């Protein structure tokens, strides 16, 4: 066989493969055309994740050529939705916006009733990752870490479930700083918790910086501290917990562990086992949606920031977090979050 015939064969093979890829993409586009895609939120209406889903849905609908509707499926701090999507039909018609921090934590400490493996979802990309903020009610008398450490002080926190983000963040904060705390669960969203704080039912909330900035701007809460080694770009005048308190190595370990979980951010996933050509089309639609300048500008106006990261990055971060602690550390985290 001559060199020319080999090259001709390779070119022909390349053209065939390219045409096959185009055909598969066209099939996937045809599948989504006019269908209804359910954008699931594992929390109630009115919180930060619900706001993100409703902001993104129209852009994703345009890219998919489908109708995208937001479905709220609250329960156990997002656990119900995670389990349903993980074990659901792998048809690419249900997406889930995941709070990666509590989802990763719940799996890491082997929370009861978990039926998912975060690393084995079909990942679609990261919407954004962010630091978390401790905010307090205007009536609580807490404006700084020093206020919270006053003798006789008891702080009431709110959450949806024990490892939902707000509740486990509160548990770790109270464990690290040895604060007398009570965490009240059962709220459907951060919005509900904030309203409870305004009514005087709760004192504090552990929340993402974008939601904290929104609630602060509205005068509903007072930001106490950024719970990481860096300040939030949205709340640059709020000092970190490291700046406000002289922490022991033990306390630093607790806060570093919780901050590392934050790198998981807001993740988009669908059920594992989605047909490859459909998954590729869906991932491309998500990438184009989250990179759309109009969506990014809309998010900036409402402080719902979008900073897309590829699905491969989401899986890499997830695997890193899930293998980051020793069995003994895992036991201590479990005791802090669940009291056992």
Image (cartoon, grey):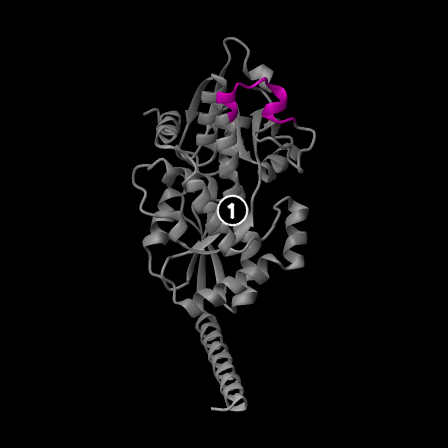
Residue 184's image quarter?
Answer: top left
Q: Nearer the viewer, residue 210 or 334?
A: 334
Q: Residue furthest front?
A: 2
- Total numbered circles: 1
Residue 3 inside the magenta-drawn segment: no
Can residue 65 be seen here? The reply is yes
Q: Residue furthest right?
A: 237
Crowd rating for badge 1 (residues with CA inside 10 Å; few <14, some 14–19, many 20+): many
Q: Percent from the top left, x then y, of residue 219?
A: 64, 30
- For mark 1, give the secondary structure: strand
Residue at 67% x, 58% y is: 293
Of 249 and 5, the residue lying toward us: 5
Q: Would you place residue 304 above or below residue 214 in this image? A: below
- Relative image position of residue 134 (x, y in whole percent): 56, 28
Picture quarter with the C terminus: top left
Vertical placement of residue 163 versus 199, above or below = below
**Magenta region includes residue 250:** yes
- Start and end of the magenta stretch? 239-252
Rendered position, 35 above or below 255? below
Q: Which residue is mark 1?
A: 266
Task: Pinpoint residue 285: horizontal percent, then vertical percent.
Answer: 53, 64
| Residue beneath the point at 48% across and 64% down | 282
**Residue 199 visible in image:** no
Q: Percent from the top left, x then y, of residue 143? A: 62, 20
Look at 29% across and 41% down and name the residue there.
113
């Amino acid at each position: 066989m001559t060199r020319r015939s080999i090259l001709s064969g390779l070119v022909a093979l390349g053209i065939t493969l390219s045409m096959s890829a185009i055909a598969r993409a066209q099939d996937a586009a045809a599948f989504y055309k006019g269908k209804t895609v359910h954008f699931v939120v594992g929390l109630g209406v009115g919180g930060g994740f619900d706001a993100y889903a409703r902001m993104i849905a129209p852009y994703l609908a345009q890219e998919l050529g489908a109708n995208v509707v937001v479905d709220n499926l609250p329960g156990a701090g997002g656990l119900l939705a995670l389990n349903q999507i993980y074990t659901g039909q792998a048809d690419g018609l249900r997406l889930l916006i995941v709070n990666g921090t509590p989802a990763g934590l719940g799996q890491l400490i082997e929370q009861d009733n978990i039926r998912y493996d975060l690393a084995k979802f079909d990942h679609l990309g990261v919407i954004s990752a962010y630091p978390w903020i401790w905010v307090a009610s205007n009536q609580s008398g807490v404006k700084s870490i020093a206020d919270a450490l006053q003798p006789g002080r008891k702080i009431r926190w709110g959450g949806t479930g024990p490892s939902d983000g707000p509740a486990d963040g509160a548990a770790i904060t109270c464990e690290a700083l040895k604060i007398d705390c009570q965490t009240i669960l059962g709220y459907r969203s951060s919005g509900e918790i904030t309203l409870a704080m305004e009514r005087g039912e709760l004192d504090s909330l552990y929340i993402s910086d974008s939601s904290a900035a929104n609630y602060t701007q509205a005068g509903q809460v007072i930001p106490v501290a950024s719970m990481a080694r860096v300040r939030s770009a949205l709340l640059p005048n709020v000092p970190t917990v490291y700046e406000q308190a002289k922490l022991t190595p033990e306390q630093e370990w607790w806060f570093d562990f919780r901050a590392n979980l934050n790198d998981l951010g807001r993740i988009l996933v669908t059920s594992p086992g989605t047909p490859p050509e459909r998954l590729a089309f869906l991932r491309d639609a998500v990438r184009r949606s989250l990179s759309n300048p109009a969506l990014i500008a809309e998010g900036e106006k409402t402080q719902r920031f979008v900073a897309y990261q590829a699905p491969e990055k989401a899986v890499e971060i997830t695997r890193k977090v899930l293998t980051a602690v020793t069995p003994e550390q895992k036991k201590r985290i479990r005791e802090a979050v669940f009291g056992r």
